[in-house]
Amino acid sequence: MRVHRSLRAALIVFALGAGLYIGLSGVGQVYAYPYSWWGSSWGCPYSYFYSWYCPYYSYYYPYYYGSYSYPYSYGYSFYTQPTQVQLTMNVNPSSLQGAVNFTGAGAYNQGSAASFSASQSIIQVSQNTRYVFSGWTGDYSGQGLTGTVTMDSAKTLTAVYQIQYYLTVNSPSNLPPVQGSGWYNATDSATLTVQSLIVGDTESRSVFTGWILDGTNGPATATMTIRMGAPHTVSAVYKQQYYLTVRSDQGGVTSGSGWYDAGTQAQISASTPPNPAYGITMIFNGWNGTVTSPANQSTTVLMNAPKTVTATWRTDPTILYGTVTAVAAVIAVAAYLITRRPARSDTKAASDPSRSQVEPPKGDV
């Protein structure tokens, strides 16, 4: 009996010591997954055990005494570390590798979540060249600068940047601006369209003459398409035109009215109007307006603004006056001769009495 009591006490002490050891080592059945019985050792069953807060595995041998069991670690425990995988971050094109700041690259526990980001949405290379973030490729796809991936394996992410070039479009300051200036992807095409004729008022207008592309004459069509594989500067070229009005204050035919390029010389002329009456001649009296030679019926006008010039005329009655004088003279001479002829007949009759007798008519017997 005494031996039995002593053995019982020894077993109790042994079980309490094993339990104390397990509690101090941080392993407790309350944190364990359910037992999975694998087999037996020395005739005792053992199981796989994993602690929530202490990453090692143990084999447990539950011993039974009466209605109590006392699990304890037998000495097969060993520590394990989580598997780690690498998150690698690249940039396309590779020439920007040092220009883009990434966050998130590195080692992660397998199965964990990794947050990452690229800091720059735009990388300015020069005044007319830049790179713009367009999205991610590789083991993640998205358009935002930030994202999250599950690291169930090693992953590689690539931030893709699109190169862009600037198109500068110029037009005369006094005309409506030509639309189309801005940034374009290198694979894009820019189409520009202008008005062929811009009328300022009834006497001035602007006429499109063509494009200048990067300092070289381009097409003369109103629409032009440019491949944006590089920065470009385009200018729309117009010429200014003014209207010239040529008139005559006495009718007649004039020439030279119309549109002229600014700064050019316009050739004008005016024909002599018909004579208004017999004996009255139209004489050119000069031009009203700014002309090169005002006294000439044919001259030129410098078209540096809208202009109106008028040919003026005066009447010359010299022929009429000469005709009237000549006619008057003829009438006067005729009248004089008519009035002087009877007086001469009476004088001769008085001086010759024999002529006063009536002679018989010739031929009478």
Image (tube, grey):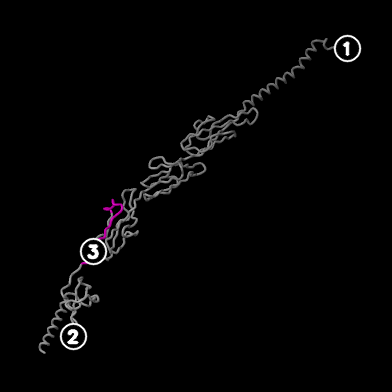
Residue at numbered disc 2? 66
- Dot placed on the residue nearer the N-terminal end, 2 or 1: 2
**Which of labels 2 and 1 is toward the front?**
2
The residue identified by callout 1 is 364
Q: Eyeballing the image, is 141 above or below 188? A: below
Relative to 144, is 243 on the left or the right?
A: right
Q: Amino acid at mark 2?
A: Gly
| Residue 38 location, quadrant | bottom left
Left or right, 109 with respect to 215, comes to left
Using the numbered discs, state the Cα–Cα distance from disc 2 to disc 1 in whole angstroms: 215 Å
The residue type indicated by label 3 comes to: Gln
The residue where tag 3 is placed is 84
Residue 79 at x, y percent in the picture: 18, 69
Q: Residue at x 56, y 30 (%)?
A: 284
Between 191 and 203, the residue placed more toward the observer is 191
Cα distance in 3D space between marks 3 and 2 = 47 Å
Residue 97 among those drawn in magenta: yes
Q: What segment is highlighted magenta in the picture?
A: 81-99
Callout 3: 10 Å neighbours few (<14), some, many (20+)? some
Residue 140 image position (x, y, % from top left): 32, 60
Q: What residue occupies the far left of the structure in this picture?
A: 2
Give whichever of 203, 281 is nearer the camera.
Answer: 203
Please count the marks in the image: 3
Residue 193, placed above or below residue 63: above
Q: Quadrant of residue 24?
A: bottom left
Q: Earlier in the sequence, mark 1 or mark 3?
A: 3
Which of the two discs, 3 and 2, labels the residue nearer the N terminus? 2
